Image (cartoon, coloured by chain):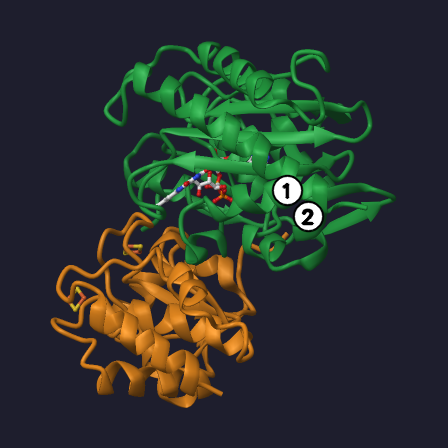
Chain colours: A orange, B green
Amino acid sequence: MSAVPAALKVNHRPVDLEGVPADERLLDTLRWRLELRGTKEGCRSGGCGACTVLVDGRPTLSCLTLTRELDGREVTTIEGAPDHPAGRAVLEAFESEGAVQCGYCTPGFVMALTGFLGRTPRGHRSTERLLRELQGNLCRCTGYAAIARAVDRAGREAP
Amino acid sequence: MSSFDLVAPASEEEAVAWLARAPTGETAVLAGGTDLLNDLEEQRIAPRHLLSLRRLPWNRWSWTGPALTIGSTTPLVDLEYDPKIRSEFPGLIGAIEAVGSVALRARATLGGNLGRSGSASDLIPMLLALDASAEIVGPSGRRSVPVDALVVASRRPALDPGELIRSVLLPEPRASAYLWQRIRPAQDVSHVGVAAAFSPGDGRWRIALGGVPPRAIRIHPGASELPGRPSKAALEAAARRAAERLPLATDLRATGEYRRLVAHALVIRAVEAAGAMREGAP
Ligand SMILES: Cc1cc2nc3c(=O)[nH]c(=O)nc-3n(C[C@H](O)[C@H](O)[C@H](O)COP(=O)(O)OP(=O)(O)OC[C@H]3O[C@@H](n4cnc5c(N)ncnc54)[C@H](O)[C@@H]3O)c2cc1C
Ligand code: FES
Ligand code: FES
């Protein structure tokens, strides 16, 4: 029975989990232990999507994930998005469509969309489908129109 | 310092043995944690140990002829991306897609949903309409229990001390649909959820209604009451009778009267949607 996890990787770098308290959430590990402040805390209870990161390529809420549950797994945060083929396209689309106002929700949107596009070939990226993947992401600034344009563009341009 | 420690047994036997040794009330079982972490944060529970199920081989599914057995710790997203499950159990996929957001479903599991036994669960009505049973493992071995007999009360499923939900069995593929009413798709929970499924085995419909405290209810109309291909009038009458069975529960989400009106409309639509799938069948 192992109470001690091996390690996980964050943006390809190994992170030793020895000494990480059992109750520490991935959100807090990223922001406070690893000083990767791109990942945002909104509600801390699963309802806003601001804390979304990729775990083994899949959008996952870091606020509802205990870090030590992830031993052996690979986490990608917004800081790793530029090195992710779909992530780069999503970042560029958000920028060129002006889909960012205060920016607090942006990392969550970018990672949720990156996870979906990374796994979904062109031809399966209808606007409706893409927006459905983002239902868990809230934005209090933009009114969503610019985000929707960016999402469409990313769907067309991501590899 | 953490107020609890985290243990992750590598086998079912170890997990059961750990629970048998632990003093009652000191250990909480952790699957995806989407409910449990909120319970911890709100101090609804204060366990000394969390028993994580992550290393158990329960995170997969298997087919035995037409029957599907889903391991209790399978993340819900894995199920929704499987084309065969989608075509054989469309209503289950509809219900899964109603659970929070995609990023929540990367963690949330079927076993955790049953462990929570929430009255607003979207999965429980569909499992009832599919006549699902749960396989339980515990100090006295394995047993199987209908989901209907398991989800008896919110946060208190009918499990004996030290028992774990191992898997969920769906006996046969069914034309099925799940429909819900709520304010926002991913941030709210269902005020009413309606599951409908048609059993090719006995030629009868199953309807289940959820979202209403204290728990989801299962309705099994007779073949004369709701025939395989019901007339508009028969369906209308069956839907009215089903809605009348809903407890008249008013809470901060909706009034009892509103819920019955919505349930009536959703039963009609769910049976029609599932019926349309049967038309497409050979
Ligand atoms: C923002 C948000 C939105 C949500 N929206 C919905 C929704 O729309 N519809 C819906 O149905 N649910 C919803 N939920 C609830 C939740 O996501 C589900 O109940 C989920 O399926 C629970 O699974 P889990 O693996 O995360 O469970 P956990 O949180 O790990 O466990 C839940 C409970 O079950 C027990 N348990 C877990 N696994 C087992 C097992 N194998 N055997 C015995 N006991 C076990 C745990 O001890 C705990 O008490 C939502 C939750 C959040 C936070
Ligand atoms: S902070 Fe995680 S969903 Fe809101
Ligand atoms: S840009 Fe401010 S919350 Fe979305």
Q: Which residue type does callout 1 highlight?
A: Ser
Horizontal and vertical percent position of residue A111: 37, 72
Q: Nearer the viewer, residue A124 or B275?
A: B275
| Residue topped by disc 2 | B58
* Vertical position of residue B93 compared to residue A14: above or below: above
Determine the secondary structure under disc 2: loop
Horizontal and vertical percent position of residue A146: 21, 73
Q: Nearer the viewer, residue B38 or A100?
A: A100
Disc 2 to disc 1, C-alpha distance: 6 Å
Tell me the crowding category of disc 2: few under 14, some 14 to 19, or many 20 or more residues within 10 angstroms, Cα based: some
| Ligand 1 neighbours mark 1 (CB distance < 8 Å) | yes
Tell me, yes or no, whether the two marked residues, 2 and 1, touch with CB atoms within 8 Å.
yes
Residue at 27% over, 18% down:
B255
Residue at 29% over, 39% down:
B183
Marking on residue B7:
none
Q: Nearer the viewer, residue B239 or B108?
A: B239
Determine the secondary structure under disc 1: loop
| Ligand 1 neighbours mark 2 (CB distance < 8 Å) | yes
Q: Which residue type does callout 2 highlight?
A: Trp
* Vertical position of residue B70 compared to residue A72: above or below: above
**Image quarter of residue B39:** top left
Horizontal and vertical percent position of residue A138: 25, 58
Q: Quadrant of ligand 2?
A: bottom left
Tell me the crowding category of disc 1: few under 14, some 14 to 19, or many 20 or more residues within 10 angstroms, Cα based: many
Horizontal and vertical percent position of residue B7: 54, 48
Residue at 50% over, 62% down:
A70
- B22 displayed left or right of B155: right
Marking on residue B72:
1
